[in-house]
Image: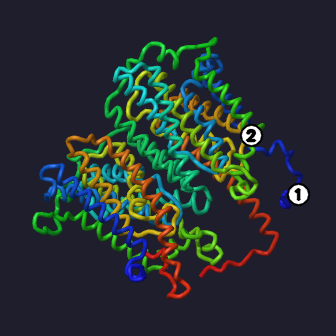
Amino acid sequence: MTSIRRAFRPEQIRALSLFALLVVLILFFASQIPNYLSGRTFTRISTGVAVVAIVAVGQTLVVLTRNIDLSVGSIVGCTAYFVGTALANDNAIAPAVAIVMALAIGAAAGAVNGVLVAYGRVPSIIVTLGTLAIYRSFLVAVSEARTVTIDSLPDWVKELPRANLIQIGELDVRVLVALALAIVIIFQLVLTYTQFGRRLFAIGSNPEAARVAGLPAQRTVFLAFVLCGALAGLAGFFFLVRFGNVTVVAAQGLELQSVAAVVVGGVNIFGGSGSMIGALLGAVLVETIQQSLIRMPQVSEFWIEALLGLLILLAVASDALILNRLRRIWSRPAATEPPPPEPTQP
Amino acid sequence: MSATSTRRPLPDFLRRWEVLLLALLIVSVLINVIQSPFYLSLENIVNLFQLSIEKIIVALVMTFIIINGEIDLSVASVMGLAACVVAFLHNQGVPVAIGVVMALLVGVLCGAFNGFWIARAGLPSLAVTLAGLIGYRGAARILVEDRSIGNFPDWFNALGQQPLIGPLPFALILFFVMLIAAAVILQRTAFGRYVYVIGNNREVARYSGIKVRRVKWSLFIASSTIAALAGVLLAARLGAVRGNTAEGFELDIITMVLLGGVSIFGGSGTMTGVALSILLILNLRNGMSLANITGNTQTGVIGALLILSVLVPNLIVGARAWRSRLRRATPTRLSQ
């Protein structure tokens, strides 16, 4: 028991069991769907994950501080639409400029959320439930229900989603996927090694203690929302590139997917613990189920939402009930052994 | 407190949130009357209630939940699920009356399921009902997929649209009965006091011998059951049901409650305030429709109202605290 305890922390056991669940699911789908284990499946799922994972990274930053951002779906829709319109009007806009535009639009929307939550002291669920509606209705009103079509976009946008970074055997790793992976890794490092990252954990595990200890809680929460918005903006750019056609209802419901990915990935909904790698695993799991259900002949694709809800509930319940018990077992011999590992460490 | 003692304070009743709401209500009614001379006609007033009747019925129970310090995000999905149960069973040839009973039963089950995780397992209602928001909507979609199911029998359609007593349709009468019942339960019974006490301090409530779990459990069952009833009424009024019926209604419902002066942190709020805020929101929506503002923009306005209804009281409290802090020495902060 002690040796197991030394080798793994509860969080690692959770991540491993999530990974095992993913493998079992893939094997199950492979046995049900003909030609499932192919390069095409990988491409399809991985490009889908690229969008969800970036949103989930931002969502993780916010959830770590014991908040939630329900407006990300609307932010993704807004950026995809506005950047798409700009590119359609002026095909000469450089890719870098387009990305900066997306980041700026997203960050501005995130800053509104951040000000209201951190400085206005309005609970994040209220603020983002409101801005979820406000941003979307702003988009509908401004766009007058016009659609961005793929024909009007510059050529580089049309080529980007099929561009490969490397090819491993049958598996194509798209540039978009590689970029998303890079973002996950960068933010994992930010969480683990930077002052900002550690503050997110401190504020989430005990906001009162963090404030008393003199951490700039308001500024940190504000920054988390701005980053979350900026990442949602980037995801909006990816959304535009991936689909080409953007309507005013684009990315509706993505906020629920991102919350699902984050919570299933082991980021505690009460804040204070979780990791980007976990959120990525959660995003992969959610996207795999979604993309595979569509191809399963005997089950209708309408099951996806019911399954997502169940997954979230199971994840929250297992975190609250099982993981806490495990942590207690792990920290029991604290008197005789060196201090137990920090439960917040990813 | 001490900050206001130097100047002449406003009379107590004038500083209440309800008075502010009443003033806003009068202003909005006046603007609407100026816009349209038919505004105060009986048909328009009945119509004004009719258009949001399902939301305001659910808002009554949501008031209890939020005063209790919890939140129920799953109500709109339960409404949709109940409507879809009726439609699905009707499509399978089951009599609509039995379908309605089944829909209400589904509501009870959803509430018991939420209540189990919140009251029994101690999970936060935010997380549980967010899962419910997605999950129950998913169940609704499984039932009707992408179809639109209508062709209900005449008596069912009449239930939602036709006047029952005088000009008042069934749902509206039900709302007024429920409003009075809710006000009496919340403000005149022991159960109502328990709801406040738990919302103020759950631990104190437990040590005082209040059965906290039972109160919470019954509130969540009531919430989902009433939401299911509202969903059935919505199906009757619309005459057709789709997978996305009642989607997004939680925004309006929660806004009505919070704008009514109910604290999102629990423990305070009155039924009078919620009733006033319901009237105010109905007036605003109707006024915006009269001014040819689209439903989409209206939703945006409701979203802004939701944020403002929490932000404004916060700013007032913040300004008072800031003023009184100026009198004392500013505490030094230890940051970095």
Q: Nearer the viewer, residue B21 or A325?
A: A325
Left or right: B212, with B302 as reference point:
right
Question: Which residue is situated farthest in the left direction here?
Answer: A169
SS type, badge 2: helix
Q: Residue at x 43, y 61 (%)?
A: A59
Q: Which residue: 50% across, 48% down?
A: B129
Can residue B155 be seen in this snapshot? yes
* Amino acid found under the numbered disc labelled 1: Ser
Residue B110, percent from left and from top: 49, 40
Q: Is residue B249 above or below residue B289?
A: below
Which residue is more in the foreground, A136 or B113? B113
The picture places residue B321, in percent across and down from the top left corner, at 75, 63
* Residue B250 at x, y percent in the picture: 52, 41
Q: Residue at x 46, y 39 (%)?
A: B77
The numbered mark at residue A329 is none
Q: Is residue B40 left or right of residue A223?
A: right
Q: Which mark is residue B5?
A: 1
Q: CA distance from mark 2 to mark 1?
A: 23 Å
The quadrant where residue A183 appears: bottom left
